[in-house]
Amino acid sequence: MAVKFQYNKTSLQGLEKQLKIRERALPTIKSKESALRLEVKRTKDEMTALEEKLEKDIRSYESTSALWSEFNAGLIAVKDVALSSKKIAGVIVPVLDGVAFDVKPFSLFGSPPWFFDGINVLKTLAHTGIEAEFTGLKLSMLERARRKTTQKLNLFEKVQIPGYKDAILKIKRFMEDEESLSKSSQKIMRANLEKRSNKEEDEL
């Protein structure tokens, strides 16, 4: 990104102001980027753990798959998902507070004795699955925020701050050269005036 500027004091002051703003903001952006990086890693680990738990739980019930064919899947459904939100390094992410299930009444005498345990198993599996989904959503939001923050950090650190510094240096050099040139011109002009004055005096 080329910094637009003019070779004058007003442009110089404007660039110096912009540079100060970015230099002051840089430590905050760096700490936010670092916090988001850590949170992304932590959430990835959390997601992996939930997915592994779900897989392990499903595998542990595979041996009883023949029994599940007798189970009435309509007995249980997710009724509600309680949500809240919290801020992590300036990013609002969803938080799963709980899952409410709707369990239809069934005959304890007319159903196999393991139905009650089966309902609890499904509750656990569903809760873990929903928790994994929410963790995935949180992870994508955090990753998007981390990418944006990294881009902003790189823009400030590698493009804008060096660009402003370079432009400021160019203006200062130009103004110094202009001042030197002006002084030199004044000296030449004074010397010429003195010569002319001396010549006129000699002629008199």
Image (tube, rainbow, N blue to C red):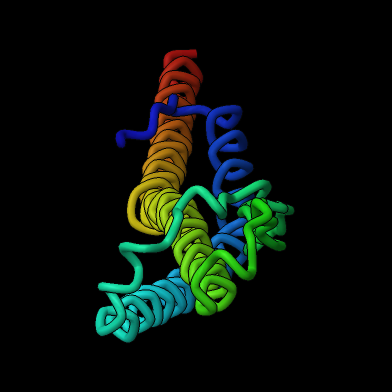
Rendered view: 29 above or below 80: below
Rendered view: 151 above or below 7: below
Q: Nearer the viewer, residue 60 or 187?
A: 60
Residue 203 visible (yes or no): yes
Residue 128 visible (yes or no): no
Tell me residue 110's x, y (percent): 56, 64
Q: Nearer the viewer, residue 12 or 36?
A: 36
Rendered view: 84 above or below 55: above
Tell me residue 145's x, y (percent): 48, 52
For image coordinates 54% across by 29% down, the residue present is 11
Image quadrant holding the N terminus, namely top left
In this view, the residue farthest toward the front is 110
For image coordinates 47% across by 70% down, the residue present is 125
Tell me residue 189's x, y (percent): 44, 25
Tell me residue 95's x, y (percent): 65, 59
Q: Is residue 151 left or right of residue 29?
A: left
Q: Quadrant of residue 195?
A: top left
Q: Is residue 59 left or right of residue 148?
A: left
Count of numbered circles on the image: 0
For image coordinates 53% across by 66% down, the residue present is 111
For image coordinates 69% across by 58% down, the residue present is 87
Rendered view: 53 above or below 69: below
Q: Nearer the viewer, residue 62 or 13?
A: 62
Q: Is residue 190 left or right of residue 88?
A: left
Q: Nearer the viewer, residue 89 or 138?
A: 138
